[in-house]
Amino acid sequence: MQQQLTVKQLRNKALEAEVLDLRKGKEAIEENARHDLGLIKQDETFFQVIE
């Protein structure tokens, strides 16, 4: 039970840090949009590497 609590506390701290980043500015939001939604800005070139 102690191990589960520790894991959940670490997860909560990571989520809290992410929320603070999102509240601060556009960089974290843009990073999430790039990763989750495939955001590509105008005048950028998209490269897909398939291994």
Image (cartoon, rainbow, N blue to C red):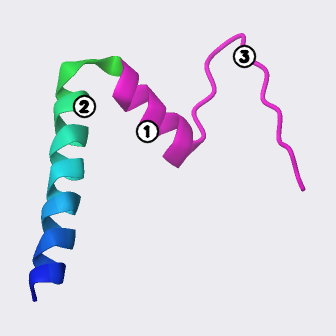
Numbered disc 2: secondary structure: helix
Q: Badge 2: how crowded within 10 Å, few (<14), some, or many (20+)?
A: some
Image quarter hosting the C terminus: bottom right
Give residue 50's position: percent from left, percent from top: 88, 52
Left or right: 29, with 39 as reference point? left
- Specify the label residue 32 is tagged with: 1
- Viewer-proximal residue, 22 or 11? 11
Numbered disc 3: secondary structure: loop
Give residue 5's position: percent from left, percent from top: 10, 76
Q: Amino acid type of disc 3?
A: Glu
- Identify the residue shown where x is 17% and y is 81%: 4
Q: Is residue 37 magenta?
A: yes
Q: Is residue 31 magenta?
A: yes
Q: How many marks?
A: 3
**Bounds of the magenta segment:** 27-51
Q: Nearer the viewer, mark 1 or mark 3?
A: 1
Left or right: 44, with 28 as reference point? right
Q: Are marks 2 and 1 in contact (CB under 8 Å)?
A: yes
Tell me the distance, in whole angstroms, between the alpha carbons under discs 1 and 3. Answer: 17 Å
Tell me the distance, in whole angstroms, between the alpha carbons under discs 2 and 1. Answer: 9 Å
For label 2, the residue is 22
Quick one: label 2 or label 3, which is nearer the N terminus?
2
| Placement of 5 over or under 36, stated as above or below | below
Quick one: label 2 or label 1, which is nearer the N terminus?
2
For label 3, the residue is 44
**Residue lying farthest bottom?**
1
- Identify the residue shown where x is 60% and y is 40%: 38
- Specify the label residue 23 is tagged with: none
